[in-house]
Image (cartoon, rainbow, N blue to C red):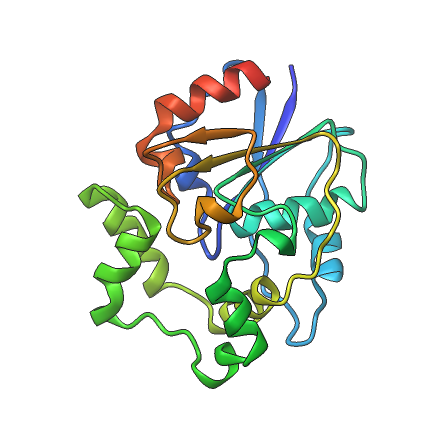
Amino acid sequence: MKHIYFISGFAADERVFANLDFGENEVHFIPWKIPGKKETIASYAKRMEEDIHHPNPILIGLSFGGMMSIEISKIIPVEKIILISSIKTFHEMPLYMRLAAKFGLNKWIPLHPYSFLERIENYNLGAETKEEKALLKEYRNNINQQYTTWAIDQILNWENDWQPENLVHLHGGNDHIFPIRYIKADHVIPDGGHLMLMNRAEKVNEILRKLM
């Protein structure tokens, strides 16, 4: 039996992993914490790492959680890192994020859960069902503004140029957040969007079973 630790995407929780199947392996979820206003991503990763209680775990990170998994792997040895709908280094950052970081747009235009943007956000995230859209709406309504401000800044300004050898990357060919043209993935689900682990779970599970 292996110990698998999950880190969800930006402001999400363990419900995004509900459709994944890991058989008899033991799964754990590392929740997001409220960051200090000037906390570094390395310091934050250290606090996340304190929730890991087994040696050589498998880390599975979705989106921002994948980036955080890499930061944690700089601190402790891990058996494997599995990224889903994420990026490995800043080289895979899409152009629109690079421009936002260069001009500091996130500081000029703070992110808020505007209702009139919900359809655009749902489309970009690849939400397809009423349940998925309702879950995203719940996340928006309960988001912590200090975490949001910090996380967006960390994502846009992530300078990581290193990746561990034991990393496997799953990505969707229809991901609008991290477009596939910038990504070098080990496994691509052609019709998968950013939330493919929810609405393409059978295909994701097929790959994960082989990796386990």
- Looking at the image, which is closer to me, 89 or 42? 89
Query: Looking at the picture, how far across and down is residue 114, in whole percent?
Result: 28, 72
- Choose top left, top right, bottom left or bottom right for residue 154: bottom right
Query: Residue 65: where, in percent of width, then height?
Result: 56, 48
- Which quarter shows the N terminus? top right
Residue 124, compared with residue 190, is above or below; it is below
Rendered position, 48 above or below 112: above
Where's residue 66, x and y in %?
A: 58, 45
Residue 4 appears in the figure? yes
Can you say which quadrant of the picture contains the C terminus? top right
Image location of residue 98, percent across then percent down: 55, 67
* Residue located farthest toward the bottom when viewing the structure as drawn: 108
- Give the side of residue 119 with respect to residue 174, left or right: left
Vertical arrangement, residue 153 with respect to residue 91, above or below: below
The number of callouts visible is 0
Residue found 48% across the figure and 42% down from its top: 85
The residue closer to the viewer here, 184 or 31, is 184
- Is residue 146 in view from this perspective? no
Along the line of sight, the residue nearer the viewer: 119 or 44: 119
Specify the quadrant of the image occupied by residue 175.
Answer: top left
